[in-house]
Image (spheres, rainbow, N blue to C red):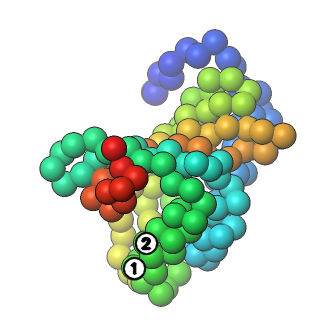
């Protein structure tokens, strides 16, 4: 059994359901490679946290154009076939408007399966969730040198 940290906030059923629905929508957009619509679900500038091949932590901020350009390239490199996701998500609610979501996922495309582990920092504004920070290992070399720190 996973013991989650006590943040002082107990999420409601609606909190959990709305966040789960957001991820279902995002996964569906990803599977269809609808990058512009994926970008609609983010707060920019978007923070990225990763590491590079030298083992150093890297961070960057992307504006919408950089997100769209990078994700379009990444999605095209994943092949032309369907993309499917099977994900287990563990949300930790900090408040009704802030959650950190840890994801273990299996992504399959063109018959190739990839195991992914990542985290997203989510914010709710005007009743809608959006991602503001993406945290995943292995992307540091791909972050723009001009924008990465």
Horizontally, residue 17 falls left or right of residue 31, namely right
Q: Residue 57: percent from the left, percent from the top?
A: 28, 41
Q: Residue at x 51, y 71 (%)?
A: 69
Q: Residue 65: percent from the left, percent from the top?
A: 57, 66
Q: Are marks 1 and 2 in contact (CB under 8 Å)?
A: yes
Question: In the rendered view of the protein, which quadrant contains the C terminus?
Answer: top left
Q: CA distance from mark 1 to mark 2?
A: 5 Å
The answer to whether 148 is drawn above or below residue 84 in the figure is: above
Question: In the rendered view of the protein, which quadrant contains the N terminus?
Answer: top left
Residue at the farthest right position: 126
The label number, if any, that marks residue 74 in the structure image: 2
The answer to whether residue 145 shows anywhere in this view is yes
Q: Residue 15: percent from the left, percent from the top?
A: 75, 34
The answer to whether residue 84 shows anywhere in this view is no
The label number, if any, that marks residue 128 in the structure image: none
The answer to whether 71 is drawn above or below residue 144 in the figure is: below
Q: Secondary structure at mark 2?
A: helix
Pick the residue in front: 80 or 89. Answer: 80
The answer to whether 118 is drawn above or below residue 77 in the figure is: above
Mark 1 crowd level (few <14, some 14–19, many ≥20, 10 Å Cα): few
Mark 2 crowd level (few <14, some 14–19, many ≥20, 10 Å Cα): few
Q: Which residue is mark 1?
A: 77
Residue at the farthest left position: 54
Q: Quadrant of residue 40?
A: bottom right
Horizontally, residue 19 falls left or right of residue 78, namely right
Q: Residue 100: percent from the left, percent from the top?
A: 55, 34
Q: Residue at x 33, y 62 (%)?
A: 142
Q: Residue at x 57, y 56 (%)?
A: 63
Residue at the farthest front position: 146
Q: Residue at x 51, y 64 (%)?
A: 66
């Amino acid at each position: 059994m996973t013991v989650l940290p006590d943040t002082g906030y107990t999420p409601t059923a609606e909190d959990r359901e709305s966040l789960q629905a957001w991820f279902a929508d995002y996964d569906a957009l990803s599977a269809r490679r609808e990058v512009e619509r994926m970008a609609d679900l983010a707060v920019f500038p978007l923070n990225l946290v990763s590491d590079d091949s030298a083992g150093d932590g890297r961070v960057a901020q992307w504006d919408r154009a950089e997100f769209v350009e990078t994700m379009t390239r990444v999605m095209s490199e994943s092949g032309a076939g369907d993309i499917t996701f099977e994900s287990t998500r563990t949300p930790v609610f900090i408040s009704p408007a802030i959650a950190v979501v840890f994801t273990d996922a299996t992504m399959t495309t063109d018959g190739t399966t990839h195991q992914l582990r990542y985290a997203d920092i989510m914010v709710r504004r005007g009743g809608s969730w959006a991602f503001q920070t993406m945290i995943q290992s292995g992307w540091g070399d791909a972050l723009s040198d001009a924008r990465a720190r």
